[in-house]
Image (tube, rainbow, N blue to C red):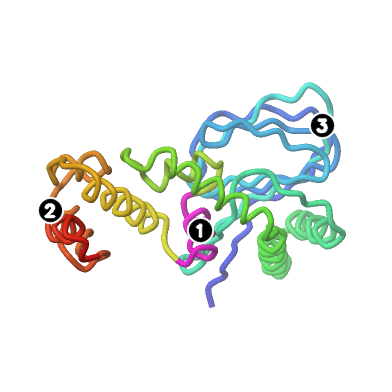
Amino acid sequence: MKLKFKLVYATKRNTVPYKLQDKRIDFNDITFVHEGQLSYIINGTAFTVTKGQAMYCPDGGMRYRLKGTENAVYTSLNFKCGPDTKLLLPYHIFEADSFDLRFYLSKVVELYERDGEYDKAKSDSFTALIAYTLLENVSLTEENRYVSEIKNYISCNWNKKMSLEEIAESVHLSASYSSALFKNSTGVSVMDYIINLRITKACDMLKYSDRLISEIAESTGFCDIFYFSRMFKKIMGVSPAKYRSAEKNNFF
């Protein structure tokens, strides 16, 4: 049976934090601060992790830690997920000062340092507990805030070319986490939300302007008029030309 979480490194340090070079990591990194603070740049965004908080950088993320100026007490866990496991955690800062997490952390480091086969298996299990505990600690209020920020970003950039990665970066979340969070809250994917908003804007232009359909397609963020027409008919049930004609004759 394949493990869903595989711990590759664990340590608890009480020292001036040393500098980590800017590089793309091939593991998940969760670092908890017990005293003092740590400063990171994750995928180009700066974060400061203070006492009682945790920082998560996903597998494949760009991670850079600045050298500390004073002693800090912190625990770092590096682990990999199995092929059927996807950890949907944002890589911003978590509030992580709970008795359960402190206990799990102490056990992981203790078991990792023993380095026995049975200890390794148990440390993997505690790593999974830590990951899922953090996931549960993402409150509904926090989720709603992120969804609101994503909607606001889309509202300000609806007619521009946007990727899911760009949108997620604007709210300091991973693309996979922001996608799941948005769909769970709204019932539609981020990209479907954008398309629906663009089609709504196109409807107004078809109704209240005499602009060419090709111009409307381009101005609403569709670089291909054929794709625009296909999406319009899929959502509105008629072609852009028929919609305009019906609106002009008050059929809708």
Left or right of residue 11: residue 85 = left
Above or below residue 40? Residue 220 is: below
Residue that lies at the very extreme toward the front in this rendered image: 249
Q: Quadrant of the N terminus?
A: bottom right
Task: Give the numbered dot on residue 182.
Answer: 1
> Taking 113 as reference, is 148 left or right?
left
Q: Tell whether label 2 touches label 3 (CB within 8 Å).
A: no
In space, the residues marked 1 and 2 are separated at their CA atoms by: 28 Å
Residue, x 47% and y 69% (percent of image)? 84
First along the sequence among labels 1 and 2 = 1
Q: Quadrant of residue 129?
A: bottom right
In the rendered image, residue 111, in percent from the top left (x then y), is placed at 77, 60
Sequence-first disc among 3 and 2: 3
| Nearest to viewer (mark 1 / mark 2) | 2
**Magenta range:** 175-187
Q: Which mark is residue 15?
A: 3
Q: Nearer the viewer, residue 1 or 118?
A: 1
Query: What secondary structure is marked by label 2?
Result: helix
Mark 3 neighbour density, 10 Å: few (under 14) some (14–19) many (20 or more): few
Q: Quadrant of the C terminus?
A: bottom left
Q: Amino acid at mark 1?
A: Phe
Q: Nearer the viewer, mark 3 or mark 1?
A: 1
